[in-house]
């Protein structure tokens, strides 16, 4: 199943600090997810000042439960970065 994840960071003054503290481990995990064929595409959501305020990801997992298990262990979730997360099942028209 394919999903789109839209996740916004907290809006407090420490939000960017929390993101940067775990960003390297999040990126390392995303690389492993990509190598395993689960991550289709993803990246940061930027505000008008080009600051990272969230993320969006296209992913593919066998089930929503498998996705939730991965998501619960992502450093942006466990590190309190993503505070507003939506997950929607999708069917991509093209996948590279």
Image (cartoon, rainbow, N blue to C red):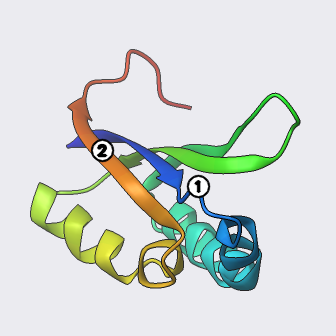
Residue 14 or residue 79, whichever sits in front: 14
Q: Which residue is at the front of the view, 56 or 52?
A: 52
SS type, badge 2: strand
Q: Is residue 7 visible?
A: yes
- What residue is rendered at 88% in x and 35% in y? 49
Front disc: 1 or 2: 1
Quadrant in which the N terminus appears: top left
User: Is 21 situated left or right of 38 in this image?
Assistant: right
Left or right: where does residue 64 sit relative to residue 44? left
Q: Write the residue at 24% across / 36% down.
A: 88
The reply to whether callout 1 and callout 2 are in contact (CB within 8 Å) is no
Residue 7 placement (x, y as % from top left): 45, 49
- Which label number is shown at residue 86? 2
Point 17% across, 57% down: residue? 62
- The Cα atoms of the two marked residues, 1 and 2, are separated by 17 Å
Q: Say few, some or many: other residues with alpha carbon within 10 Å of mark 1 (under 14 / 14 to 19 / 20 or more).
A: few
Please, is residue 9 above or below residue 55 in the view?
Answer: below
Disc number for residue 11: 1
Residue 5 relative to residue 76: left or right:
left
Depth check: 88 or 86 in front?
86
Q: Secondary structure at mark 1?
A: loop
User: Which residue is drawn at the image coordinates 54% and 70% (left, top)?
Assistant: 81
């Amino acid at each position: 199943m394919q999903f789109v994840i839209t996740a916004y960071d907290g809006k407090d003054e420490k939000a960017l600090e929390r993101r940067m503290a775990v960003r390297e481990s999040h990126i390392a995990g995303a690389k492993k997810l990509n190598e395993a064929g689960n991550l289709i595409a993803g990246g940061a959501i930027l505000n008008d000042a080009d600051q990272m305020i969230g993320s969006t990801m296209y992913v593919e997992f066998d089930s929503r439960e498998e996705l939730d298990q991965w998501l619960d262990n992502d450093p942006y979730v466990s590190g309190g970065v993503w505070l507003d997360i939506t997950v929607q099942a999708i069917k991509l028209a093209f996948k590279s």
